[in-house]
Amino acid sequence: MNDTPLLTMRGIVKRFPGVLALGGVELEVRAGEVHCLLGQNGAGKSTLIKVISASYQPDEGEILWEGKPAALSTPQASMDLGISTIYQELDLVPDLSVAENIFLGHELSTAGFSQRGETIRRTRELLARLGHSEIPPTRSVGRLSPAAQQIVSMARALSQDTRLLILDEPSAVLDQGEVDNLFRVIRNLTAEGVAVVYISHRLEEIRQIGDRITVLKDGSTVATGLDVNQTPTSELIKLMTGRAIEYVFPPRGDAPAPTGDPVLEVIGLELPGVFTGVDLSVHAGEIVGLAGLVGAGRSEILETLYGARRPSAGSVRVAGRELRRGSVPAAVKAGVGLAPEERKSQGLLLDQAIYRNITVSTLGRFSRLGMLDSRSERKRSAEVAESLDVRPAGVDRLVRLLSGGNQQKVVLARWLMRECRVLLLDEPTRGVDVGARAEIYTLVRSLADSGVAVVVVSSEVEEVLGLSDRVLVVREGRVVHEGPADEIDESRVLDLVMEGKVA
């Protein structure tokens, strides 16, 4: 038996102007294992996988492939060894078909002529292997759901002779059924000897699929080769953060049950083909969570409350006043704010500064005689950013350069400056590390304590139950349960979303 690791990295250093991104990383990956890479946002995980895929060249260190020095000088050289990477931000071409995306760069051809029929046949085989025969090979990728796009990206990786597959937050856009299918595919691959590097912030996933763990912190390896089954979660958190986090969710406090009129009141809301008969009320200072599978209609409910979708029936009232259907300006004027699921594409101006992202919904406050007072805009943004501990400090930095957790804080800062009455949060901690999660949970609870009515959607049942005061369970567009969060547990929620029995 050959015990030589497939990939060995020693003392990997990568510098950028003014930044030491990697300060001596050690990593060893064996054929046929799932090696989990953990660390907070900014720990160096993304930089490391870009070194493995040869998008970046290390400044120092040694890379071995099957025990021999490897010259990963170009991305093609990395792919020639059998290294495939699926990034969190999928690099698909929206206007090309599924088949064209899968074989992009290694098209099937004979004598210079494209083999369209063979390409489609091979595409069907790959999609069937992944358990998704329903995805049409000729459909444009841009018309697919995020989950289906993830599957296409995996099919593209498997279309080549992959020996090492790197998955960066692969479950971020998948529901539980999709995650189970992903794990099935991974197990089949490792059984064939393929090595998998798996990056996730969801520690429960690491327990289900991982074999060994490497932890990065501040660009360096702080632990490597840890046995998944022998390493307590508390130890992993301490390694990632440098401190123990005893309470992820802030206490709810001893405030009495809310009385009086709700700040947000929804009656009989309906969006054809998506959800129907939704009733919802949220009082000042209350956090209400919506639990359910991806595709159950949770995100669409929030988008409708925000005016981004026009319902066919029902009403939405804020502080007793009914909102005009399908009008974002009317919702924002009434005090409704939304932190969307896809914050990078829907919630942020990535190539604008932090301060502009914070003030984009309140620019009128900084206008003087038709001219924008940039000094006041920056000053007020800096105060709000500092109150939320947006890191690194300084509001002139481009928002795309921030970690996921700090980008989410910028979105929240926007609505904090707006002094919104109702805050809608869709997957507030997606792609956010465990330390930043705790900070965001505390921030959301403090906003509620200040009198904001909060509605939270999350695919993580534990998050919904831990953060919310009340929970609504949504299945296939219908609310099948409503009640206090501390009177229902995770297993009961899963029963409801799977079986759909009204509780």
Image: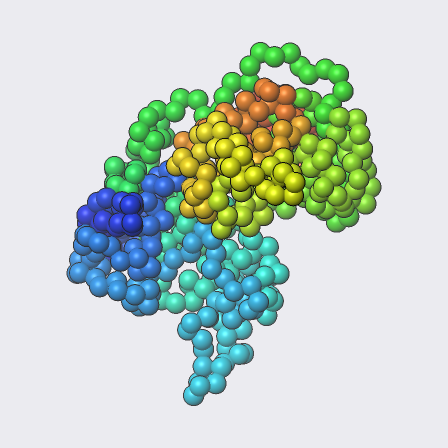
Quarter of the image containing the N terminus? bottom left
Question: Is 452 or 229 nearer to us in this picture?
Answer: 452
On the rendered structure, is 112 left or right of 481? left
Residue 406 x/y as whole percent = 45, 37
Quarter of the image containing the C terminus? top right
Query: Looking at the image, is 96 positioned above or below residue 492?
Result: below
Residue 309 shows in the view? yes
Q: Which residue corresponds to the image point at 78% horizontal and 36% vertical from the top-left?
A: 323
Query: Looking at the image, is 40 positioned above or below residue 469?
Result: below
Location of residue 337 (image quadrant) = top right
On the rendered structure, is 5 left or right of 440? left
Residue 224 x/y as whole percent = 25, 41
Question: Is 199 or 480 nearer to us in this picture?
Answer: 199
| Residue found farthest to the bottom | 111
On the rendered structure, is 119 left or right of 335? left
Q: Which residue corresponds to the image point at 56% horizontal and 63% vertical from the top-left?
A: 94
Residue 422 x/y as whole percent = 66, 30
Query: Looking at the image, is 194 positioned above or below residue 231?
Result: below
On the rendered structure, is 301 left or right of 427? right
